[in-house]
Amino acid sequence: MQKITRDVLVEKAASLLENGTVDRVLGWKKGEFDYDLTPAVFTSADDLKDLVWNDFCGANFSKYLIANTKKSASKVLVFLKPCDTYSFNQLLTEHRFDREKVYAIGIPCEGMADISKIKAVTGDGISSIECGEKINVTTIYSDDTVSFDLSDVMAERCVNCKSKKHVAYDELIGEEGDVIESGRFDEVERIENMTADERYAFWQNELSRCIRCNACRDVCPACTCEKCVFDNPNHSLENKAPATSFEEKMFHIIRAFHVAGRCTDCGECSRVCPQNIPLHLLNRKFIKDMNTHYGEYQAGAEVGSRAPLVNYTTEDVEPGDVFEGRE
Amino acid sequence: MQRIGVFVCWCGSNIAGTVDVQAVSDALKNEPGVVFSANYQYMCSQAGQNLIKEAIAEHRLTGIVVCSCSPRMHEATFRKTAAAAGINPYMVEIANIREQCSWVHKDMLTGTEKAIILGKAAVAKVNLNTPLTPGESPVTKRALVIGGGIAGIQTALDIADAGFPVDIVETKPTIGGKMAQLDKTFPTLDCAACILTPKMVDVAQNENIRIFSYSEVTAVKGFVGNFDVTIKKKARYVNEDVCTGCGACVEKCPMKKVPNEFNLNMDNRTAIYIPFAQAVPKVATIDPMHCNMLKNGKCGVCSKVCAAGAIDYKQQDQYIEEKYGAIVVATGFNPISMDKFDEYAYNQSKDVITSLEFERLTNAAGPTAGKLLRPSDHKHPHTIVFVQCVGSRCSACAEKGKEYCSKICCMYTAKHAMLTRDKYPDTEVYVFYIDVRTPGKNFDEFYRRAVEEYGVHYIKGMVGKVSPEGDKLKVQASDLLNNKQLHIDADLVVLAAAIEPDKSARPLATMLTASMDTNDFFTEAHPKLRPVESPTAGVFLSGACQGPKDIPETVSQASAAASKVISLLVKDKLTGNPCVASSDELMCNGCSSCERVCPYGAITYVDKEFRMPNRTIAIRRVAQVNPAVCQGCGACTVACPSGAMDLKGFANNQIVAEVDAICK
């Protein structure tokens, strides 16, 4: 269960809208299902009745600021969970929106639920979900309510949460947390320890499910190009990926390279993947390698920091050493 | 659509011996865009070039592919040929079917197959080539010489003589380098100081030369013709402009027990010091590690005795920024450390010394005023053993020493042996050697004189062990020619230590983006044909930083480097490289990745208005490249996530087309 209530957010948003500080509010709204919360823009206190804040508010709004700050005459109010603030900073580092046009409120997060973990128990036919102390789920299969503890159905990225600390905000609601030593690289290590054939089989199995819906790219706060290279007919890559049976792998590998050093490990790619591909593992492999070879670096921890891949110091590891596996 | 001509060169039998050139020109005839294909014995010859020119005119070619040697050899030739025939020189691509093909293959079938593939890749690229025009950049008419030894001195004097200002940056308080520490010089035995110090004075008096002594280069930016260099002038706590070099401070300084590095720590100096009598600039320097005033504020004698009022205990390190058109590296060498050579007991006995220490022991300005005395008991040694190749010519698997020959040791050891016998005929002198190498004018005659006239015992074989016993050094060695073991009771053992590049060379190479070999010697642009240029444009090499050298060789290389610098500085403008980056502003998302990786500061960001759909205007932050500053390294094109940054002449789509042609 989340520590602060929806009403606190609504009240805050309503007063900021009313006094003219902001003219747009980015928040979560119920979609087709109770667990399917969509990002939404609220422009009046009246709209805010639809704002939701519960264990399913996974969406990271940082990227939405690029479009919304351009539409706003004053400021955009955005609610940021701790992990969202890293994306927020990274986007500022890349000059993707005007900081002056944002009113950022940091909100604490107890972790978000992963609906697939619930569905694994209840089946797909969920008719309603209520979030309170527990997550109470009713299904079309029976009249009984199934209850879950959030901790039992928490999304992988939240189980391995890297930080409860907000690295950017104008105002903080609730208590500030700390950066956490998480086990987020354990799974990467397991894959590293596979033989090359096993590893290929692992990714073949995962990536062959990809339907190229582009959801991972569209949600990714690091994917903010004016035009994605995969959509640009003048770019030599555009006609490469689809021209081969290796397409999905090509797409994901290239994407991982493009966000390397800029990915904050927010985990949105894996959250939105309709095929449940653990895409975050590709990015984490890059993060782990950069940490090993160039020292600990967290993208978005501060504005303006230079990622190791676009920085050079005389202490940098020699490429040969990386190739030979020396550190 | 391009109209491409393909020209396959035989290079005599260099290519034609391993590649079926006819098959290559036939195969490439059918590639897209190719309208003409021929082969010829020497494409770079006048006749070969005429063949290209005629084909361009006759077949109205828009681009050409020359399948020949490395582009480093003849790309410029064929570009000029193309330009003379009226097509843009950047519509020329070279397929390297010699170094990358015929020379590395033995089998005609494999060689031919690969040559065809390389040719196809070049054709694929020319299909996407566009005419390019180079820009120009101005030349800063000032040179920087890093290192003030004999190499740096000679280079600076020659450049200054041509009328260009030169700055010398030297880390020590005085210029002069290793040569200033030497006694006599082979093979003519003139006194090193007598021939060096007039040159040092010339430097000091030359209006075109500025000396930054006790200084180092801390940052280098820019490119040929336009380097921005930061020089750190370390605080010497003495005002250089005021100090007269009278030496009163040195005389009165109470801190007299500081190891004297100029005499290789064989005697002591004071905390405020002038390294030697003929130092340039002749200015005192306070050693902050040993000065009581600087350490704990208790003393101040030097400031009291200084009539000129030059002492300034509050002096700070100073950073100077200066622009240069060319940079000469003259960082020199050092003898290697003897720590790993315990068999010679260098660290156990004071009477085991290196050859450079021997130079100081025989130098009139040295710790013994030129008398050859043992460092331990100041007695005259009667038996001296010289050991050659200590740390030189070591096997690659040995954990100590260098693989290369240090080149100068044979000659200076012959000199040491000869001079010892000349001055002290009662001394027995043994020289242990692997080989005696004396190529050089009057060198072998010199060595033979040592053996034949001066009776130096030259023994082929190495010393296995030196063990101090009482006041003697027991030397165990093998005499390979007589096949027996020798035991010599020596009074003094002199080790001809290998030489290595100065430790400052590697960080400097990084700053200059100049390449080095595995031994940290700077690499030449071409080992035979461009020996004084670094592959980095505008960076030149002088002296032992490039490889072991004696004085005559160093001086001639120093003058050669100077002449290269002069021929660069006389130019008012340099023709740039048209293969520069440019950004597609419609694709650029303003993320600044390119700006951050650009080593030349060629990229800036501007807020620019763009016309958007429905007659709206959007202001977007986009990257712009200054083509005069861009050096075409391509770092930005890799850093750009959007593919907005591309390199002219090496565009992503051109490279992908080449890869496609190879993989097809």
Image (cartoon, grey):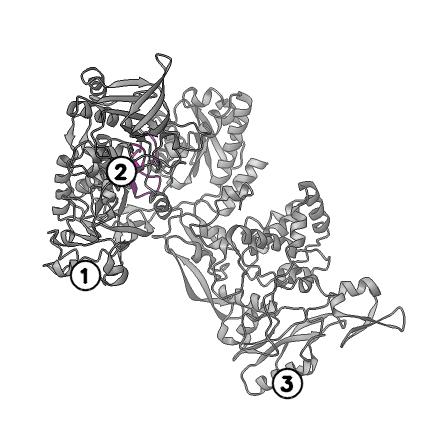
Q: Give, as a three-letter code, the residue at label 3.
A: Glu
Report whether residue B215 is seen: yes
Q: Position of residue B101 (x, y in %)?
A: 49, 28
Q: Is residue A290 magenta?
A: no
> Is any part of residue B556 visible from this angle?
no
Question: Which mark is in front, 1 or 3?
Answer: 1
Q: Is residue B426 above or below residue A168?
A: above
Marks 1 and 2 belong to one chain: yes
Q: Which mark is residue A151?
A: none
Q: Which residue is mark 3?
A: A11
Residue A31 is left or right of residue B552, and the answer is: right
Decide which of B428, B128 is in the foreground and name it.
B428
Q: Secondary structure at mark 1?
A: loop
Measured as percent of width and height from the top left, residue B91 is found at 42, 40
Q: Nearer the viewer, residue A310 or B463?
A: B463
Percent x, y of residue B580: 40, 49
Q: Residue B542 — which label?
A: 2
Look at discs 1 and 2 and give the one toward the viewer: 1
Which quarter of the figure is the N terminus of chain A placed in?
A: bottom right
Which residue has dot 1 on it? B300
Residues at badges 1 and 2 in contact (C-beta under 8 Å)?
no
Span colored in magenta? B523-548
Q: Tell me the amino acid under the disc marked 1.
A: Gly
Mark 1 vs mark 2, CA separation in Å: 42 Å
- The amino acid pointed to by label 2 is Ser
Write the residue at 64% across / 85% down.
Answer: A11
